[in-house]
């Protein structure tokens, strides 16, 4: 049953509208009755409705303002305007805002019922179109993800009007910026693109299009075509886009692979930014050496509580040092390294976990971010919070604890324990353990494990050593034990971290 809101500042008229119709017989339910636009808007935000029947002239907020504010939130809500003002200006504004009808007071019961029935019918038609639209997109994603059967290929070729030919087709995925964009804006773009001869369009919600250029020509001509198209979209519709073009193809069965290649290029939006158009050939020679991070420098700034220097370094790294010739994998490697370094420092100093993102959250942010600034912002915030937290819990190690920490840093490969160290420094092992726990914030065994795992992490990210060799290098002869301790420390296995490096 569709929901209705009645809005009228005069209580008598409001109750009259409520009682003159059998709402249930119309398949409707009146869930809100408001006396002005602001009250109606507050009610709508708590429980949205399908149809709003409202007066125009009301205190606090008039009916047309209410209409505009609700339409900003939900374009499919239908409005019926009631007013005693028989003025063309009001009617014209109501029509511009796509009001279902404009009914003069006193209200004619039969006219209101007729308009409500037509409105219900229109909403049902819109819902059917939406279902059809969703079904179509689901079919396309089924095909593009390589799940269609070979006997189905002909259907998709027919929909795109693609036939095998000697020349090449060129496919690209266009993603648009949703910032400040209304649905009507991208609808206008799609309508315009579908008018272009030789260009086939598939809308892939929520924010991209698959474009297939059927005209003959090489890759350079296709790139030029998509670049010019991008410029026109921005100038004519004020919509900023990013386009990634896959390799050329000749047959419909090759399109899913081409789509995946073009889709993968969308990750380069992080480096290139909106307004860019790139191809697979352009990025194939980019190398991971194009970006580097001085971990020792950043760690030093953080541990010395040099907030300004640490934040400046992170901002400079992500904003100024990411060159256009960098590969996306190099950017991800740097971001993962920074996330691991931050996690290591938090564990080492036993900082309050509730104040920070944990490692899985940081990594999720890295791989879901749309641009470099999104990654930069979360790291700058995290670093600043760590330094603030370290200031709050500032403490100086006693000489014996500094000696033990130095011993661990230099001899972590050895089978050391607190008992042998206590003997070496002529102290009671239990007492030494209490001092270490109090000053460092974790047990000696945990500190040793964190140190080993930190060095292992660096070897995983910065070398091609086998995991088994890395385990032995840091003093874990049993690889399965190393896996368990590493995952306890970082929340991911050594193999998973190595895969992140390859991403």
Image: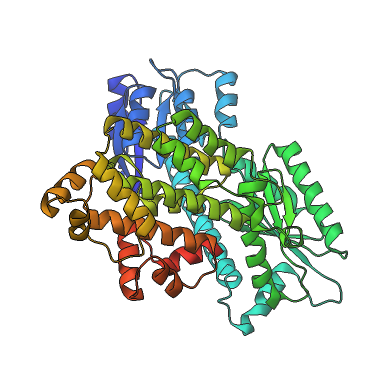
Q: Quadrant of the C terminus?
A: bottom right
Drawn side of residue 219 relative to residue 38, left or right: right
Estimate the x, y position of residue 44 in percent, counting from the top left.
35, 34
Drawn side of residue 428 relative to residue 56, left or right: left
Estimate the x, y position of residue 60 in percent, counting from the top left.
38, 16
Whether residue 360 is situated above or below residue 167 in the rendered picture: above
At 17% from the left edge and 59% from the top edge, which residue is drawn? 419
At 36% from the left edge and 21% from the top edge, which residue is drawn? 36
Please tell me which residue lies in front, 143 or 311: 311
Drawn side of residue 267 relative to residue 310, left or right: right
Please tell me which residue lies in front, 33 or 256: 256
Tell me how many marks there are: 0
Estimate the x, y position of residue 25 in percent, counting from the top left.
31, 48
Estimate the x, y position of residue 371 in percent, counting from the top left.
57, 45
**Res 481 quadrant in image:** bottom left
At 38% from the left edge and 62% from the top edge, which residue is drawn? 492
Please tell me which residue lies in front, 146 or 190: 146
Please tell me which residue lies in front, 21 or 307: 307
Drawn side of residue 215 relative to residue 312, left or right: right
Q: Is residue 20 visible?
A: no
Display coloring: rainbow
For this orientation, the residue located farthest to the bottom is 151
Q: Is residue 235 visible?
A: yes
């Amino acid at each position: 049953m569709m929901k209705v809101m009645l809005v009228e500042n005069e209580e008598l008229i409001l109750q009259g509208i409520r009682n003159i119709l059998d709402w249930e017989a119309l398949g409707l339910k009146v869930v809100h009755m408001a006396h002005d636009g602001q009250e109606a808007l507050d009610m709508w935000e708590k429980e949205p409705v399908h149809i709003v029947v409202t007066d125009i002239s009301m205190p606090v907020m008039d009916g047309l303002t209410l209409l505009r504010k609700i339409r900003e939130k939900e374009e499919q809500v239908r409005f019926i305007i009631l007013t005693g003002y028989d003025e063309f200006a009001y009617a014209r504004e109501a029509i511009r805002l796509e009001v279902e009808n404009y009914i003069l007071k006193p209200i004619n019961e039969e006219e209101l019922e007729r308009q409500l029935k037509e409105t219900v019918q229109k909403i049902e038609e819109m819902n059917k179109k939406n279902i059809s639209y969703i079904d179509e997109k689901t079919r396309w994603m089924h095909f593009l993800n390589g799940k269609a059967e070979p006997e189905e290929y002909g259907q998709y070729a027919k929909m795109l009007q693609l036939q095998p030919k000697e020349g090449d087709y060129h496919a690209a995925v266009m993603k648009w910026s949703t910032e400040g964009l209304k649905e009507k804006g991208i609808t206008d773009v799609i309508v315009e693109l579908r008018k272009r001869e030789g260009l086939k369009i598939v809308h892939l919600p929520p924010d991209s299009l698959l474009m297939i250029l059927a005209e003959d020509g090489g890759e350079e001509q296709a790139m030029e075509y998509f670049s010019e198209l991008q410029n026109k979209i921005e100038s004519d519709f004020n919509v900023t886009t990013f386009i990634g073009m896959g390799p050329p193809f000749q047959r419909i069965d090759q399109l899913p692979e081409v789509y995946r290649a073009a889709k993968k290029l969308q990750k380069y939006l992080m480096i290139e930014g909106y307004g860019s158009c790139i191809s697979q050939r352009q990025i194939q020679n980019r190398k991971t050496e194009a970006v580097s991070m001085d971990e020792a420098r950043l760690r030093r700034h953080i541990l010395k509580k040099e907030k300004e220097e640490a934040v400046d370094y992170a901002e400079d790294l992500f904003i100024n040092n990411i060159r256009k010739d960098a590969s996306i994998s190099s950017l991800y490697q740097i971001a993962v390294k920074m996330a691991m370094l931050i996690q290591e420092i938090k564990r080492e100093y036993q900082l309050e976990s509730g104040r920070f993102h944990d490692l899985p959250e940081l990594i999720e942010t890295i791989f879901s971010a749309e641009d470099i600034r999104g990654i930069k912002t979360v790291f700058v915030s995290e670093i600043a919070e760590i330094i603030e937290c370290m200031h709050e819990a500032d403490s100086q190690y006693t000489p014996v604890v500094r000696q033990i920490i130095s011993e661990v840093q230099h001899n972590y490969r050895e089978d050391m324990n607190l008992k042998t160290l206590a003997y070496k420094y002529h102290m009671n092992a239990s007492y030494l353990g209490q001092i270490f726990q109090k000053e460092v914030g974790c047990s000696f065994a945990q500190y040793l494990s964190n140190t080993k795992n930190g060095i292992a992490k660096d070897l995983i990210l910065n070398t091609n050593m086998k995991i088994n060799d890395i385990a032995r290098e840091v003093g874990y002869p049993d690889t399965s034990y190393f896996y368990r301790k590493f995952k306890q420390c970082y929340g991911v296995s050594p193999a998973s971290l190595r895969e992140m490096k390859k991403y």
